[in-house]
Image (cartoon, rainbow, N blue to C red):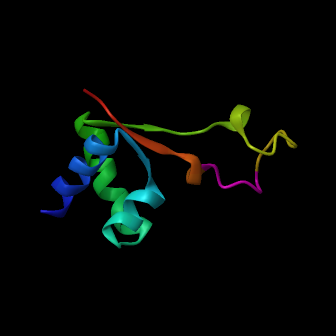
Amino acid sequence: MLITAIRDYIQLQGRANLQDVARHFRLSSSAVEPMLNFWVKKGVIKLIKRDLLTCAGKQCSMCISCNLDAYASYVWIE
């Protein structure tokens, strides 16, 4: 089943972002994200988002040009 394969992929990698997971399974990010969120709710993986303090540009107080969601990582919790 695909949802368990995604869980296993995160476990094997230790950490992966949404685009990496989508690319690995040849799916769109919008198809993979709900499955990853399922495992986040189960407490198996953790979603770590970048905030404005870690913005790559550091040129504005409210980041509207950077896609901070692209920097979010899913991390395996033991």
On the picture, is 76 further left or further right than 15?
left
- Residue 50 drawn above or below residue 70: above
On the picture, is 62 further left or further right than 12?
right
Nearer to me, 64 or 1:
1
On the picture, is 19 further left or further right than 70?
left
On the picture, is 22 further left or further right than 38?
right
Q: Is residue 53 magenta?
A: no
**Residue at the image point whose x is 72% and y is 41% from the top:** 55
Where does the image place residue 44, in percent across and percent down from the top left?
24, 36
**Residue at the image point whose x is 41% and y is 67% from the top:** 23
- Residue 42 drawn above or below residue 19: above
How many numbered marks appear?
A: 0
- Residue 67 drawn above or below residue 14: below
Q: Which image quarter is the C terminus in?
A: top left
Q: Give the magenta range.
A: 64-68
The quarter holding residue 21 reads: bottom left
Where does the image place residue 18, in percent across and percent down from the top left?
44, 55
The quarter holding residue 54 reads: top right
Residue at the extreme left: 1
Where does the image place residue 47, in percent across and percent down from the top left?
42, 39
Nearer to me, 53 or 14:
14
Residue at the extreme top: 78
**Residue at the image point whose x is 35% and y is 73% from the top:** 26
- Residue 63 drawn above or below residue 28: above
Give the dominant element type of the magenta stretch: helix, strand or loop.
loop
**Residue at the image point whose x is 21% and y is 48% from the top:** 8
Q: Which image quarter is the N terminus in?
A: bottom left
Residue at the extreme right: 59
